[in-house]
Image (spheres, rainbow, N blue to C red):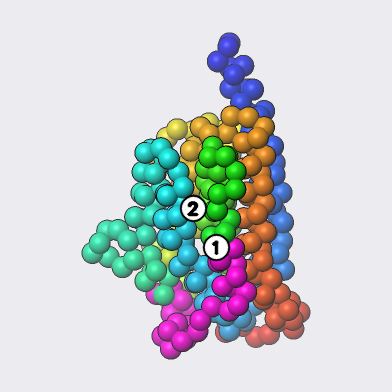
Amino acid sequence: MAEAMRTDSRRTELEPIDTSEALLVSAFRAHPVLASFDRLARSQVLTIALQRRFVSHAFTPLYDVAIDCVSDPPTKRCLREILREEYMPYERPTHREDLVQDLMTMGATWEQIVTIGPTAQTSMMIADMFAALRKQEERALFEIKVLSFLRFAGEVLVAEEYQLMWPRFCTLGLAAPGSTVGTPSAFYHPHMQHDAVTFRFSEHNRMLSRQSHSDQLTELLRCRIENKAGIACCLESVRRAAQLKAGFYDQFVESAVAGSEAQPTRG
């Protein structure tokens, strides 16, 4: 009985995080660019995806910074494992190479990939993500901030992005692994799967071997968030992550909305 009461109390304490995240995800999915993604022309899709590639490149150094920010060995080990998935096994292409493969399947050229650089807006967004990991509070709250930001910006919202983009990607030649039509996606589809949330903060799941990256970070945060200050820190961090991620897509609003309204013939 006492254990059940403690579980119920813990669930109640953490529910505000679930509620806030659900609202942030809903608002993010309603962004004009993401909401109209399936109606964009191939050229618009590739323009966005080629810029989004630079955000993906920031994933590994963000994890490197986060590893330096946390103190306990189990957390460092978890972050290392997620980071090393980007490059293992060593005999196969890295995730960065997988991304290029998917882009070229959809029609991007090698010349575009090696010539196009990040826009000012993309570069600023990436710089702001690193700035979000700077220490401004006591250590316990700092670690909550770092893990909350990393989880929401680098895992939760990534899965949401790719889920919204996936139907359009399929029309450009990508397919789920095992499909007999199209080219199996080496990057987008796997990340859409292993970054997604499968259980909420207020739920309890210690089956780490069956958890997504988001879930693994949720467990790490559950062990740290012990009071209202921790909850407030987490909430502020996920709000910041959502703001920055949406800001990346703001640079494409005008062209995306115009293209969607014109409903061009899609290539």
Please tell me whether residue 70 is drawn above or below residue 58 in the rendered image.
above
Q: Which residues make up the magenta segment?
A: 101-128
x and y, in percent, of residue 235 in the image:
66, 44
At label 2, which amino acid type do we have?
Answer: Asp
The residue depicted at 55 percent of the width and 53 percent of the height is 134
Does the magenta portion include 97? Answer: no
* Disc 2: which residue: 195
For the residues labelled 2 and 1, the Cα–Cα distance comes to: 10 Å
Q: Is residue 122 magenta?
A: yes
Q: SS of the residue at dot 2? A: loop
Residue 162 is labelled as: 1
What amino acid type is highlighted by mark number 1?
A: Tyr
Tag 2 near tag 1, CB within 8 Å: yes
Give the position of the C terminus as an image quadrant: bottom right
At x 40%, y 62%, the residue is 177
Asked whether, in this view, residue 143 is left or right of residue 233, the answer is: left
